[in-house]
Image (spheres, grey):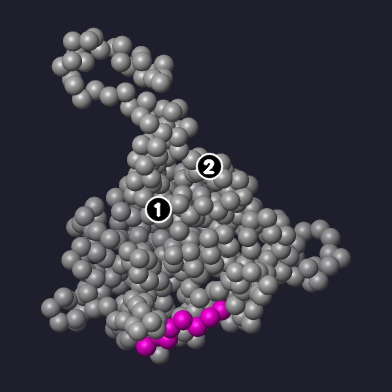
């Protein structure tokens, strides 16, 4: 049945005009199953396109699921994987407005995050810390962890981190001690499966998991170390400890606690920084080994790429010597960013190149160009802008994967 809106649109044209334009269609009255198929195709491409499609008319909205009304459910279909929050020293939008970049198209949008208004919510920043584009927040008053979708504004509450140390806080009244909050700072987060969230706290060398609706966090069995890197890949939490790539494994029956299982061994023993990124369905590792740099008067990274592959059923890390003529990688201590195409970034970004910066006080950014003919590379350096207004496109991309020093 045609809606009032579609009939009004149809009546604006006289019959003669409609005969002349034979391609006219009553789009609002498309069959529900057809709208659903179109919506699925749009969603596969980009979440924001799906949101805009639902807003076209009420029939289309009724024929498609509402990603903002999922309740406590975690639905990975609606995660903004291709969007990343731009990290700025002094956000121009004030306390709650943040800018987000679409990695594929270079489109930038402003999103209001009201959870930041009271300054009691801390965002765990960095590409590796925002699993599948989701924001992980910690309430500084209660230590409740929240999973926020910045595009749909869907929020999932998880237990308070205080449940990890109930005996330590037993009998305590008043604000949570400063030392306890510092030790339970979330340094990384991700997904162990379709419904389980993983958090890592460097201060207490602990990793824990929880699902929406759980009363408490559960520690990962036998883990008491420092992570070199972590990343969520295909709804599984991978991390590197002591040059070993591990994966958090959940017991399907829920009878045994979660555990860390060794997956593959790194070839480079001298790795001091590592980040991971999804390379179109393959897990890519960006490893850095130190080398002498006369410009910076101390040792600087030399980058190597690996991809996780299965050889005779055994997970193996295979060296990658060529990114391709249309791709680039940005990496820092907070993760990595892979541009599948530099079409919208050229000429600021060059193809087959890795850009890196490790540390907020490093005044130079590194540029490692890979040569396709023989697998060799060259490294150069450029000044890193120290002001948001002067920041180049390359600098902004690096700030998404590097800690930002906020001067007073």
Specify few, some or many for label 1: CA neighbours under 10 Å numbering under 14, 14-19, or 20 or more.
Answer: many
Compare residues 41 and 400 and report the one nearer the observer. 41
In the rendered image, residue 63, in percent from the top left (x then y), is placed at 45, 34
What stretch of residues is rendered in magenta? Answer: 260-267
Q: Residue furthest right?
A: 171
Compare residues 29 and 53 and report the one nearer the observer. 29
Q: Main secondary structure of the magenta part?
A: strand
Left or right of 384 in this view: 59: right
Q: What residue is at 64 percent from the left and 53 percent from the top? A: 157
In the rendered image, residue 392, in percent from the top left (x then y), is placed at 30, 57
Q: Quadrant of residue 174?
A: bottom right
Q: What residue is at 56 percent from the left and 45 percent from the top? A: 70
Left or right of 305 in this view: 332: right
Q: How many marks?
A: 2
Q: Which mark is residue 149?
A: none
Q: What residue is at 77 percent from the left and 59 percent from the top? A: 175
In the rendered image, residue 211, in percent from the top left (x then y), is placed at 63, 60
Q: Which mark is residue 68?
A: 2
For disc 1, the marked residue is 83
| Residue 371 falls inside the magenta stretch | no
Name the N-terminal-most of marks 2 and 1.
2
């Amino acid at each position: 049945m045609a809606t009032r809106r579609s009939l009004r649109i149809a009546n604006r044209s006289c019959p003669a005009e409609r005969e002349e334009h034979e391609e006219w269609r009553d789009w609002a009255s498309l069959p529900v199953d057809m709208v659903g198929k179109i919506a699925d195709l749009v969603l596969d491409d980009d979440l924001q396109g799906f949101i805009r499609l639902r807003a076209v008319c009420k029939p289309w909205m009724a024929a498609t699921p509402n990603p903002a009304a999922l309740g406590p459910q975690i639905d990975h279909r609606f995660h903004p994987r291709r969007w990343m929050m731009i990290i700025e020293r002094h956000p121009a939008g004030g306390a709650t407005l943040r800018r987000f970049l679409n990695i594929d198209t270079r489109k930038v949008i402003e999103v209001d995050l009201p959870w930041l208004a009271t300054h009691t919510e801390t965002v765990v920043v960095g590409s590796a810390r925002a699993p599948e584009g989701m924001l992980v927040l910690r309430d500084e008053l209660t230590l409740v962890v929240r999973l926020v979708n910045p595009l749909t504004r869907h929020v999932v509450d998880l237990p308070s981190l205080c449940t990890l140390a109930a005996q330590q806080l037993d009998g305590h009244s008043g604000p949570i001690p400063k030392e306890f909050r510092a030790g339970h700072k979330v340094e990384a987060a991700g997904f162990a499966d379709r419904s389980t969230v993983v958090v890592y706290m460097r201060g207490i060398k602990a990793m824990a998991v929880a699902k929406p609706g759980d009363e408490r966090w559960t520690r990962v069995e036998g883990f008491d170390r420092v992570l070199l890197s972590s990343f969520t890949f295909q709804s599984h939490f991978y991390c590197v400890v002591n040059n070993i790539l591990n994966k958090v494994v959940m017991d399907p029956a829920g009878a045994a606690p979660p555990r860390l299982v060794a997956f593959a061994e790194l070839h480079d023993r001298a790795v001091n920084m590592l980040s991971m990124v999804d390379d179109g369905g393959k897990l890519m590792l960006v490893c850095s080994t130190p080398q002498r740099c006369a410009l910076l008067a101390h040792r600087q990274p030399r980058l190597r790429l690996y991809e996780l592959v299965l050889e005779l059923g055994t997970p193996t890390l295979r060296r990658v010597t060529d990114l391709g003529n249309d791709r680039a990688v940005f990496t820092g201590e907070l993760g990595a960013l892979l541009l599948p195409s530099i079409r919208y970034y050229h000429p600021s970004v060059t193809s087959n190149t890795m850009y890196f910066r490790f540390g907020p006080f490093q005044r130079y950014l590194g540029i490692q160009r890979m040569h396709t003919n023989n697998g060799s590379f060259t490294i150069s350096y450029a000044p890193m802008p120290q002001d948001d207004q002067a920041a180049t496109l390359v600098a902004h991309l690096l700030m998404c994967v590097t800690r930002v020093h906020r001067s007073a």
